[in-house]
Image: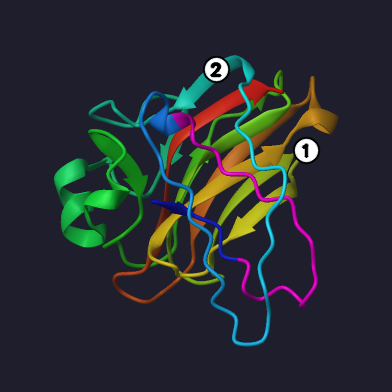
Amino acid sequence: MLSIDEHDLAPGTEIEARLPVHAWRGRTARLRFADLSPHGWLEADDVRGVQHRDELAFDDFEAEAYDARWSSTFGPAPVPWRTVVEQLGLACVQGRGSALSLGRAGTQALVSRPFRVEHGILAGLVFDCGGADTRVELRVDGAVVRSMSGRNSRALRGLLFDLEEFRGREAVLAVIDDDPRPGFGIGVDALVLYDE
């Protein structure tokens, strides 16, 4: 299950909600809208699927160890799917392994080696298992230019970073867990780059 939780928006706020569903291509899905606000309402319009061009896998963490692309204190290898089932449930399994910081004490980080931005969008799935001290950051020239913070939804959230203005420049992707509480953390999987 992949969700967008925008319950903290001001009433009447319109947003463009985009779900990266590339990890489930070819499978049947159900789109569900739920109004959980006691005083608000929900409206949807122009719901559609979009195919993307020139998709390039960044990492799906299926290897038995982190490759040379990553510097990691999450551990020596992606977390196996059985551990994901035990800790987060079957709905969060994305393959044989996922990059997760769960169960590790202290500040943890998974940081990519610098890469040249050649696509307009970075998409992926985030295991949202920590508070605002957990985050995914895109850094260009050492500055954080895109960020997504945890909300501790204990579910998968879609990651979509617009990279268009950074084409041709070097970037670094960092997944940071500064949440000190045991059993809390963050993770990523099914990272891809593509153009619209």
Left or right? Give the position of 47 relative to 179.
right
**164 within the magenta span:** no
Mark 1 neighbour class, 10 Å CA radius: few under 14, some 14 to 19, many 20 or more: few
Residue 155 horizontal/vertical position (percent): 40, 59
Determine the residue positioned at 72% across, 49% down.
Answer: 45
| Span colored in magenta | 6-22
Q: Which residue is mark 2?
A: 56
Viewer-side residue, 94 vs 141: 94
- The Cα–Cα distance between marks 1 and 2, rounded to whole angstroms, is 23 Å
Dominant SS type (magenta): loop
Q: Which residue is mark 1?
A: 141
Viewer-side residue, 106 vs 186: 186
Mark 2 neighbour class, 10 Å CA radius: few under 14, some 14 to 19, many 20 or more: some
Q: Can you say whether 127 is above or below 180 in the image? A: above
Q: Which element is circle 2 on?
A: strand
Quadrant of residue 43 within the rendered picture: bottom right
Residue 123 horizontal/vertical position (percent): 58, 36
Q: Can you say whether 120 is above or below 123 in the image? A: above
Left or right? Give the position of 101 relative to 172.
left
